[in-house]
Image (spheres, grey):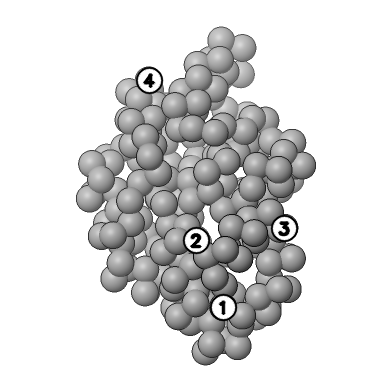
Amino acid sequence: MSTDTIIFDFDGTIANTFDRLRVIYNQIAPFFRCKQVSKEEQIRLKSCMPFEVMKECRVTFFKIPWMLLVARRKLYKEMEEVEPINEIVHALKELKHQGYTLGIMTSNSKKNVSMFLSRNGLKGIFCFISAHRSVFGKDKVIARLLKKRNIQKEKAVYIGDEVRDIEAAKRLDLKVVAVSWGFSSRENLEKLSPDAIVDHPDHLLSFFSRSSKD
């Protein structure tokens, strides 16, 4: 069955927030008694699984919702400095032109995402922006989104940059494409066997071109 709807993660997949979020995290880490992370450590942590990162940085499940709330507010003041992933704008516009329904599901705020889209010529490209506060339990968030938007999972694909994205999609038996330019290393993405891993935004066009012929 062909794909109608493509659901994108935002941070690390569309928006290059990798370094920006590290700076914000380091600003709030002392308040939450968490370990700060240098740029070199950030690169190393890409090869760690989420629970390993949490343990090393002393981030507990209880702290996450509060840290997200503070980080969102700080990020809002800096969204004008956040750039798109190189060439992702072209890929998104082309997918839209080809007739796909595009959407965003993110733990960032809808306000931040809308500002970013408007500033980068992507206003009107996405049919929906679904913001949530869950870092884990993402499969439940996706399930609610599919139900709310009346999206058949057999005709949808989820695109994300983290191992959590792959795990969530697989729990729902939803097709998932991982991008290697985000927060998780390619090696860790490969371990979870997504339907595809792409290394450049243009490869998304190739993937969906092949899929439409299957």
Q: 193 above or below 75?
A: above
Residue 34 lies left or right of residue 113; in this view the side is right
Dot in front, 3 or 2: 3
The Cα atoms of the two marked residues, 2 and 4, are separated by 27 Å
Residue 213 lies left or right of residue 166; in this view the side is left
Does label 3 or label 1 sit earlier along the sequence? 1
Dot in front, 3 or 1: 1
Q: Mark 2 points at which residue?
A: 107
Quadrant hosting residue 65: bottom right
Does label 2 or label 1 sit earlier along the sequence? 1
SS for dot 4: loop
Dot in front, 2 or 1: 1
Name which residue lies at 69% across and 36% down.
194
Q: Where is residue 91 in the image (x, y as percent from the top left)?
A: 38, 30
Label ID, residue 36? 1
- Note whether residue 122 is visible: yes
Q: Where is residue 37 in the image (x, y as percent from the top left)?
A: 57, 72
Label ID, residue 98? 4
Q: Are marks 3 and 1 in contact (CB under 8 Å)?
A: no
Does label 4 or label 1 sit earlier along the sequence? 1
SS for dot 2: loop
Q: 125 above or below 154?
A: below
Q: Where is residue 180 in the image (x, y as percent from the top left)?
A: 57, 41
Dot in front, 4 or 1: 1
The front one of 125 and 160 is 160
Q: Label 3 amino acid?
A: Met
Specify few, some or many for label 4: CA neighbours under 10 Å numbering under 14, 14-19, or 20 or more: few
Name which residue lies at 50% across and 19% down.
206
Q: Label 2 amino acid?
A: Ser
Q: Label 4 amino acid?
A: Gln
Label ID, residue 49? 3
The N terminus appears in which quarter of the rendering?
Answer: top right
